[in-house]
Image (tube, helix red, strand yellow):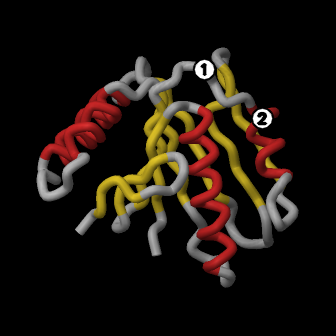
Amino acid sequence: MSLWYRVFGRGEIEVSAANLQTYLSGQTVLVTCQFAEDARGWVRADIRFATSSPLHLERYRSDEEGIRGELNSWAAFLETCDYEPKYVELMERVIQAKQLFTLRRPVDYSNEVLVESLCVGLCRFLASETDGVWQCDGEGFFAADGELLLKEY
């Protein structure tokens, strides 16, 4: 069970809060979302779908302080994954990322299948909207359509 997911988006166009809310409203459970914004758009979303802790989604732009270092750290990690044929392509995609989303799932939710489905679906949506790839701790890197690109060992 992973607690963290990341989406590395190459596109610069922001996924609007309205589009994210529309996506979330199409889920199989009632989902509410509260956004925190700055002058450039939303930066955090707390996504609630039960009485448990919310999913915490944060959005970072590559020009924000410290984010380029985070992206470079992920690229350096991928450089060590030469056991997978797509590691160079993924390393380049992470370096080219204009947006980074981090998603933390709750630890106190009893329906693991539902929470996993919501997290994976949200990552796939964000990756699709931002020309991105997504990563799940302990599992690997995935294309927007869910294809496994690199398995983490």
Instruction: Give the x, y percent position of residue 94.
Output: 33, 35
Which labelled disc corresponds to residue 119?
none
Q: Residue at x 56, y 73 (%)?
A: 107
Circle 1 crowding by C-alpha within 10 Å: few under 14, some 14–19, many from 20 = few
Place residue 114 in its image quadrant. bottom right
Q: Name the residue that disc number 1 marks.
A: 13
Q: Residue at x 58, y 39 (%)?
A: 128
Q: Secondary structure at mark 2?
A: helix
Looking at the image, residue 42 lies above or below residue 108: above
Judged left or right of residue 62, residue 120 is right
Q: Residue at x 27, y 43 (%)?
A: 74
Place residue 75 in its image quadrant. top left
Circle 2 crowding by C-alpha within 10 Å: few under 14, some 14–19, many from 20 = few
Judged left or right of residue 32, residue 70 is left
Give the number of marks.
2
Frontmost residue, 86 versus 92: 86
Q: Name the residue that disc number 2 marks.
A: 19
Q: Residue at x 30, y 56 (%)?
A: 150
Looking at the image, residue 38 lies above or below residue 55: above
Instruction: Give the x, y percent position of residue 33.
Output: 79, 48
> The C terminus lies in which quarter of the figure?
bottom left
Judged left or right of residue 66, residue 42 is right
